[in-house]
Image: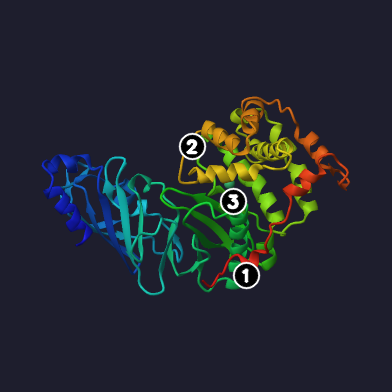
Amino acid sequence: MTRGALLLTLALGCAHPAKEAEAAAPGLWDYRVIYAGGDLRVTAHLPGSDLIITEDQGAHVHDLKGATKTGDDSWRCASPCTLTYEFELEKDETFLPSTPDLWLIRPAGSGRGSTYQLEMVMPPGVAFATGITPGPAKNTYRAPAADMEDGPYSAFGPFDLRAMSSSVTLALPRGIYRDAEVTAWAARAIDGVTQYYGHFPVPNAAILVLPGSGDEVSSGTARGGGGAAVQVMLGRKITEDALHEDWILVHELLHLGFPNLPKRQEWWEEGLATYLECIVRERLGITSEEHLWRELAGNLPRGLEDGALNRSGSWASTYWGGAAFSFLADVMIRERTQGRRSLEDAVRAIVAAGGNINESWSPELVIATADRATGVPVFAELWAQLAENDAPKLGVEDALKKLGVTGKGLDDRAPWASIRKAMGQRFPRPQAQNVDPER
Ligand SMILES: [Zn+2]
């Protein structure tokens, strides 16, 4: 039975089918999309409802059938609703970033309680690269309908899709890079994040590589919402050295293992990824212990110069202030638990409680979860001292000094030298054994 027929049966079996359809909450938004010469032919089985066709979509939609125009900008699809249309994609991009909310016409309302399913029929040589959670059948994807608008990054183009592990797919533009080098770069970053968290922090994620100009990794972003994806812009002339020095991919992958917080706490999301990126790359052996501490000592102090983190909003507060908060938490947890617990236990507990890029949490929930995991109220204290105030009890400079980070190098006779060594301890296994890029 097709899913459309299933929906129809459910509607007929109900005493008040029209009312059920009106609510549009239960059920499946079922889409089949055929990619043909850069256009998308879409068939949708939806709950009968008013439809959302955005102004931007309107310019690209042709041959819309199954919907009735009810006003200047409003459409309606009767129950049961079968909709067909063609969507014209931008033609001048070989690798076209394009999330489904751009080309899927959907029922009005929040979609809460509904699921959308997408079947993508692609011709040979062109791939649909996406971080949306895979569905039960091949080339299908499934996610909460409420997440469609801000879902994970997706793109069309001649990508090679490589399974890097059971959780991560790498979408690599074909014929542009030295593939083995780029695959090794992705494998290293995935491995560092996996080892820090104990497992990869989300069940499914995609890394979308988009070709850019130049010879380095120029930008990256991460997005969840019914899956997870990191999108990175990689210069077409990228060198192996530039891949080795890149920090962006590790930073973006770290974002997957932390919940979304209110805008006022962006410093926490960015700061944690900034601090952990330094730690993870050193623990992988990409950077040296000296480099790690030089980088932290050179950057953390300026992060707390603009005042309380919840109020500042400056670039330095957001990245290095949030990093200072995370660094101090790491040091204080280790010091108070005699090295039995660390920031690692806190972030692992947050992920175990479902706190990842697909979820939105309050800062209070993060604090409670983290402090419960370590057994010491370090996050509650730092929240009061650094987020709501600008009065750290333990300053960054004092902490660095006690750890033995001096202007002249690292001092192993410092009182907290053993904590410093534990913070930078290499991961137990070399990264090459962790990921099989050919799998
Ligand atoms: Zn970031």
Q: Considering only order in the chain, which callout, 3 or 2, is on the residue closer to the N terminus?
A: 3
Q: Are marks 2 and 3 in contact (CB under 8 Å)?
A: no
**x, y percent for residue 420:** 77, 45
Residue at label 3?
Answer: 197
Of residues 247 and 115, the one drawn nearer to the viewer in this rendering: 115
Relative to the observer, which residue lies in front, 348 or 51?
A: 348
* C-alpha span from label 2 to label 3: 19 Å
Residue 196 seen from this side: yes
The answer to which of marks 2 and 1 sits earlier in the sequence is 1
Which residue was labeled with disc 2?
A: 361
Label pair 3/1, CB-CB below 8 angstroms? no
Q: How crowded is mark 3: few (under 14 residues within 10 Å), some or many (20 or more)?
A: many
Q: Residues within 10 Å of mark 1 (few under 14, many from 20)?
A: some
Residue 219's x, y, as percent? Answer: 58, 54
Is 42 placed left or right of 289 in the picture? Answer: left
For disc 1, the marked residue is: 181
Say whether residue 170 is left or right of residue 248. left
Dot 2 amino acid type: Trp
Secondary element under disc 2, as helix, strand or loop, is loop
Label 1 near label 2: C-beta < 8 Å? no
Closer to the eye: label 2 or 1: 2
Residue type at numbered disc 3? Tyr
Residue occupying image coordinates x 65% and y 36%:
317
